[in-house]
Amino acid sequence: MNKANYLRDREVAIIAYAEQKNERKSNKTPYEQCAAVMVKLLRQTGLKPADIDGFATMMPTAEAGNTFYSNMLCEALGLQPRWLQLSDLGGCAPSGNVARAAAAILTGQCEVAMCLAADATGTTGVGHRHIGGARTEFMEPAGFQGPPVAFGILSHAYDQKYGLNLRALGTLAVAQRNGAVANDNAIEQFRKKITVEDYLNSRMIAEPARLLDCVMRCDGGNGLIVTSTERAKKMGVPHYVHPIAYSEITNFGPDDATPDITETGFSVVGPEVFEKAGMSPKDIRMFHPYDDFLIAMMLQLEQIGFCKRGEGGKFLLETDLSPTGRLPINTGGGQISAGQPGLAGGGVNLTEAIRQLFGEAGSRQVPKATNALVTGIGVIPYLRNWGSSSCMILEKGK
Amino acid sequence: MSDAKTEKKLPHPAPPASALTQPMWDAARQGKLLLQYDRKAGKYQFFPRPLAIYSGSDEVEWREASGRGKLYAWTLVHVPLRGLEDVAPYVSAAVELDEGVRLMARIVDCDPKTLKPGMRVRVAWDKVGDGSQVMYVFRPE
């Protein structure tokens, strides 16, 4: 199932990326964040608004309730796309949009696609949103105050089954924070080193989830331009990156009412994306996993296949995760240390991977950055792990 | 966020019923816990859905549940949802009913330190909202 790899022939290229600095409160709307990202992308590529004939974006929390967001965003930005995509995949949206844009390009629906993601949860707050459905009717009256409750329960299930290695999670927290210190786009208050003890001593939010297990929402935006490799060559851009394999799954295991909630959709899409690319985990130069909670990264390491189930903690303690190490992880701090610009958060991991593959990561540059695995996670379901899981392998083109 | 001192205390959050779930909340006020049953697949499902998720059919009916089950996993919530400040820190748990479905619910009348995976629990009802509605909670048997 889903083994065809339309990205195999490297006919699609990401030719530019841009990112806003994450800020606790920017007083900017997603429209303004997107505009700022778009200006940078056009400057870098020499493209004009009229050259953009494909456009993809995601549903920001700050625009909750606006059922015409993507169309109104085009109007605000002066775009006239012939292919338009709004993704509400949560954290899978930014890389999911690259996969969708690539398919649109390969099927002749557009030639140059801009993918933008922005949110302003720090400015608008999240209290105004109305998600409705089971979230409002069956989760909130049961004490669900946000993702920490779901990850608290998930962490407890993991602890019962395998034992939760807190020191390993702390090591991951420290590695990512070092990345944020070196990342000018990271939220300023997080650009200060921490220790494993700081992690262990951080206050409990939803036991065993501590403050430093959790991501902090903020404002920000990011984006990139996808086109055909042929066009990229014609344009003479200095760098490009190929998406070479992508897999995504939503509502993993819907017919199991009493699942092992530590099992995620990555158990399907992880092995599958490697099969599509003809690669294995040992071929991955660096890992840019979606990180809303530290344990989410450990589960990904186990279920994508970097190590066995229950051995994520051991793997984290034995592996050098720094930019010069064996498996660099989220070299810019990830979302946990660079900030989570709302539902545009998946773009934090994605843009850092492209920045590395372009060789533009400065003091945190990974040597011989030839490829990267980028993942996405989206949506908290009702007592069943998370909603969407996605994996994309990127390869340096030029 | 407004100043904590001036912030009005909200009631425990009430589940907003829909036409689909009204029978369940009506029964809840009588102290009965209803679950949807997929007649084709012969299995229960929770939360209530607009169809039978196992068979894809519309052959779904309400059946009264035993209200008994066991603890699967839980979290002690130190930063409460608004409205639940008076009971914080509270336990939000995945309770596995004997009917083979899990419910997210608060566990009450217990010392969180004494909870054990697999521990037997039984449904109870918490008055929520304006006091005319109820929400299921569980307590150790």
Image (cartoon, coloured by chain):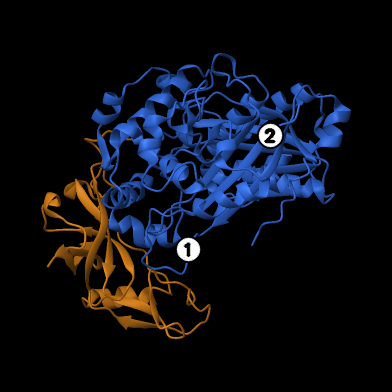
Chain colours: A blue, B orange
**Placement of A134 over or under B75, stated as above or below:** below
Mark 2 or 1: the one toward you: 2
Q: Quadrant of residue B140?
A: bottom left
Residue designated by label 2: A395
Residue designated by label 1: A253
Q: Residues within 10 Å of mark 2 (few under 14, many from 20)?
A: many
Q: Position of residue B95 (x, y in %)?
A: 27, 63
How many marks on residues? 2
Q: Chain of mark 2?
A: A
Q: Position of residue A57 (x, y in %)?
A: 65, 43
Q: Quadrant of residue B27?
A: bottom left
Instruction: Give the quarter of the figure containing the C terminus of chain B.
Output: bottom left
**Placement of A101 over or under A387, stated as above or below:** above
Q: Position of residue A218 (x, y in %)?
A: 47, 32
* Residue type beneath disc 1: Gly
* Residue drawn at point x = 21 percent, y = 35 percent: B5
**Placement of A128 over or under A132, stated as above or below:** above
Q: Marks 2/1: CA distance? A: 31 Å
